[in-house]
Amino acid sequence: QVQLVESGGSVVQAGGSLRLSCAASGRTSTVYRMGWFRQAPGKDREFVAAVRWTGDSQLYADSAKDRFTIARDNAKNTVSLQMDSLKPEDTALYYCAAKSLSSGSYYNPSAYAYWGQGTQVTVSS
């Protein structure tokens, strides 16, 4: 089992920045890739960004490119999501997730076996 705990969500004005963090514990030796997803009310959960457990191979949704940065801190066993130039449409519950190597595509939520409880990001206009 892998346990994930997110933090850092808040209310921010449009154009502002937030940094989300995800602390991983447990059987992290089974983790191949970490991802951030988000879900707005009435919408499906969508991919935001992903990074290999080793810290390389960052991948982003089009909506996150050039504004968000995902990074791994190997010493602290955390994954962060730096979000800049936030827009009201970024408002959502943000989830951290972990997947193994063989469990499917990085952008597919069903490929991730472990999930955190989510942290709310609200961007006001």
Image: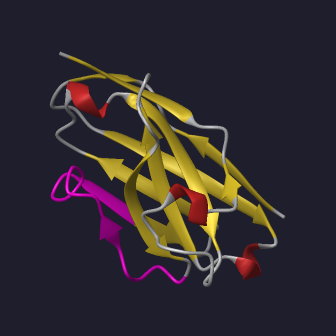
Residue nearest the observer in this picture, 89 or 105: 105
Q: Position of residue 6 (x, y in %)?
A: 60, 44
Residue nearest the observer in this picture, 15 or 42: 42
Who's the residue at 19% across and 59% down the image? 65
- Magenta region: which residues? 54-70
Residue 55 part of the magenta-drawn span: yes
Who's the residue at 24% across and 29% down the image? 89
Q: Is residue 108 above or below residue 73?
A: above
- The mark tally for this picture is 0
Residue 37 part of the magenta-drawn span: no
Q: Quadrant of the C terminus?
A: top left
- Quadrant of res 29: bottom right
Residue nearest the observer in this picture, 101 or 81: 101
Q: Position of residue 75 (x, y in %)?
A: 61, 74
Q: Is residue 92 left or right of residue 102?
A: left
Q: Quadrant of the N terminus?
A: bottom right
- Magenta segment's dominant SS is loop
Q: Is residue 98 left or right of residue 47?
A: right
- Quadrant of res 91: top left
Q: Position of residue 49 (x, y in %)?
A: 38, 60
Q: Position of residue 12 (x, y in %)?
A: 31, 23
Who's the residue at 20% across and 57% down the image? 62
Q: Is residue 68 left or right of residue 56?
A: left
Residue at the limit of the structure toward the top, as seen here? 125
Image colouring: secondary structure
Q: Is residue 68 left or right of residue 10?
A: left
